[in-house]
Structure formats: C-alpha cells, structure tokens
Amino acid sequence: QVDLVESGGGSLQAGGSLRLSCATSRSPSRYTNYCVGWFRQAPGKEREGIAALDSNGPTSYAASVQGRFTISEDKSTNTVYLQMNNLKPEDTAMYYCAWKWGGWKPPPLTDTSYNFWGQGTQVTVSS
C-alpha cells in the first residue's frame, strides 16, 4: 500500500505559476523501482495523464503541457512535485498523483498503469 497526498492547488489568473506536491508514504529500498504520474480531470472530460517520472530519472509529458510543466522528485522527503508555469484557463482541473511499482521507460501516462492514487487538489485558472 502506498498513500499519496496532493497539495498546492489554488485559484489564479492565466500566466501564473503553481507548484503541486505529492507526498508519498512509501519507504522503498534503494533497489526498488517505481513510477509516479500526475493526472488531471476537468468537469465532463476524461482523466488525462500529463507528466510522469521513473525512479531512475526518465520523464514523460503530454503535448498539452510540454515546455510549461516540470515533474521532479525529492527522494529525501518522498515528495514528487509538478511545477506549472504559464498556466492557462484550459489547465483548470482536479489534479491527482498516482504511483506504480516497477520502473518503465518512458514512464506511462495511462491511468490504468497506476495502482495507487491520491485524493486530488483543485487548480482553477481564470482568464
């Protein structure tokens, strides 16, 4: 079992920045590989994978956020971040982080690949 808690969401105007955090409960040995993904879901839309990282470094991004969002990890605090810059109204959604055991290159952006999910944090961008 891995518990995930997202934070850092909020409301802001277009062009602004936010950093989302995903605190994880796991304490893997250094020999354990995993992937962490960020997903979002807007009202009336399907959940979309936007960024993911593999525990050994590789990352993946959706075209919709490439160049604006950056996923990173602080292994000392078991926290994964999503830095979001130049936010747009279409980025408005509930944002979730998710976890899967086992590395993958490139790390997947499909939600069915992940086993554990957080409760989400809301991001609202106004024009």
Image (tube, helix red, strand yellow):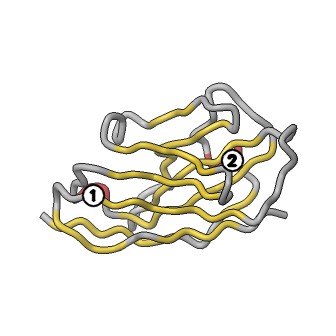
Numbered circle sitting on residue 112: 2
Q: In front here: 123 or 75? A: 75
Q: Residue at the front extreme?
A: 76
Q: Which residue is mark 1?
A: 17
Number of on-image labels: 2
- For mark 2, does the 10 Å Cα neighbourhood hold few (<14), some (14 to 19), or many (20 or more) residues? few
Q: Earlier in the sequence, mark 1 or mark 2?
A: 1
Q: Is residue 105 left or right of residue 109?
A: right
SS for callout 2: helix
Q: Residue at the top extreme?
A: 105
Q: Which x, y percent locates residue 69?
A: 37, 44
Q: In front here: 89 or 55? A: 55
Q: What residue is rendered at 50% in x and 43% in y?
A: 51
Which of the 4 image quadrants contains residue 14? bottom left
Q: In front here: 111 or 125? A: 125
The kind of residue on which mark 2 rests is Thr
